[in-house]
Amino acid sequence: MRERALGRFGRGIGLSFIALAAACVFSGAAHAQGWKPEKPIEIIAASGPGGSTDKLARTIQRIIQEEKLVPVAVSVVNKPGGNQTLARAYLNQHAGDAHYIDLGNPTLIANQVMGLTPQRYGDFTPIAVLLDEYTVFSVRADSPHKTGSALLKQLAQHPDSVSIGVTTRGGANHVALALAAKAAGADVKRLKIVSFKSNAESMTALLGGHIDLVASSASPAMGHFQQGRIRIVAISSPKRMTGALSQVATWQEQGVAAVNSNWRALVGPRGLSAAQIAYWEEVASQMAKSEAWKKELASNFWEQNLLRGQALRDFLEAENKEAKDVLGELGLAKADR
């Protein structure tokens, strides 16, 4: 799997931003000469109150208001349902209006590949990737699987011998699992996948002995991990994380070429102008520099990865190709996609 292209994309950010500036797509110093919001902004959360997307939306709302990054009021509007397709349908009801911003993640691409929606990521206006959230792989503390590599060895020999909890088939955590299993030689179509409504539910099932492994974001696992109830045998990050996750080995450290993240991005409706895109790029850039944002990243086990301009376009193209390949191998992609 890809290395998340952190170095290549990181270098591309500066070059793409210079190119955009040369094309008169301005940044913060030129805001007065370009677009700026004239009415309240809506940040659209595709989960209900308390969900992970809602939490991030309200974090962004709070920071951009406290840091005075926008001159108008900001509200969070919850539009759950349809694996985030309802939120994006609402977004595109406001074509060309940069007062409406959605929080995108890999479903922006995967939903169309799986035939859940005709919406393609190019039907919207991606503005900036903000962060990466990596998948952790948890087993009970008394599990015979001491390492991720040992677990994958069993999956390679007997793919259906381990019951694995995920929240969404074809979602980022399921894809992270499939990439690792595929790299180890397992038949990913034979994996024994059990779907849950939330990471918390899958963790409860793990602790109760009903499943053997959970692929989830880090936050719902950390309390159990720190109290010794579970063992995290691997993480899908390209390098070791810091803090409480510093003792968890990556797949790559265990000889498995599998890196994947549940990235988050600012996405506008279709038809935004260059000036509107540049305005929101600058807001994202200024937020990324704030201490409040850095604190939220650390406390939620998120890793900053700001991508804009050509770097963002290259990233989404690579994600689209990978989604078709991986979801196809899982039997979840539509044949005509």
Image (tube, helix red, strand yellow):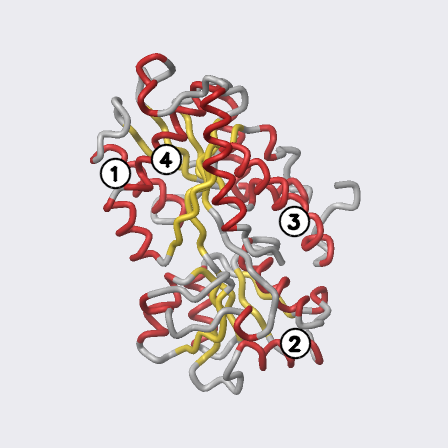
- In the rendered view, tell whether residue 209 sits above or below residue 85: below
Q: Amino acid at mark 1?
A: Arg
Q: Give me the residue at 54% from left, 23% from top.
A: 270
* In this picture, residue 309 sits left or right of residue 301: right
Q: Is disc 3 placed on a helix, strand or loop? A: helix
Residues tagged 4 and 3 counted as in contact (Cβ below 8 A): no
Q: Is disc 4 placed on a helix, strand or loop? A: helix
Where does residue 164 sit, x and y in percent of width and height?
Answer: 57, 70
What residue is disc 2 on? 155
Q: Amino acid at mark 4?
A: Ala
Pick the quarter of the image with the C terminus.
Answer: top right
Where does residue 136 sit, x and y in percent of width and height?
Answer: 47, 66
Q: Give me the residue at 59% from left, 73% from top.
A: 255
What residue is disc 1 on? 62
What residue is disc 4 on? 284
Kindly give the residue lying farthest to the left in the view shown: 66
Where does residue 244 sit, x and y in percent of width and height?
Answer: 33, 69
- In the rendered view, tell whether residue 81 sits above or below residue 73: below
If you read the primary sequence from the N terminus, does the residue marked by circle 3 or circle 2 appear first? 2
Check residue 323 in the rendering and tell me which mark sits there, or answer none: 3
Q: Is disc 1 placed on a helix, strand or loop? A: helix
Q: Give me the residue at 51% from left, 22% from top.
A: 93
Residues tagged 2 and 1 counted as in contact (Cβ below 8 A): no
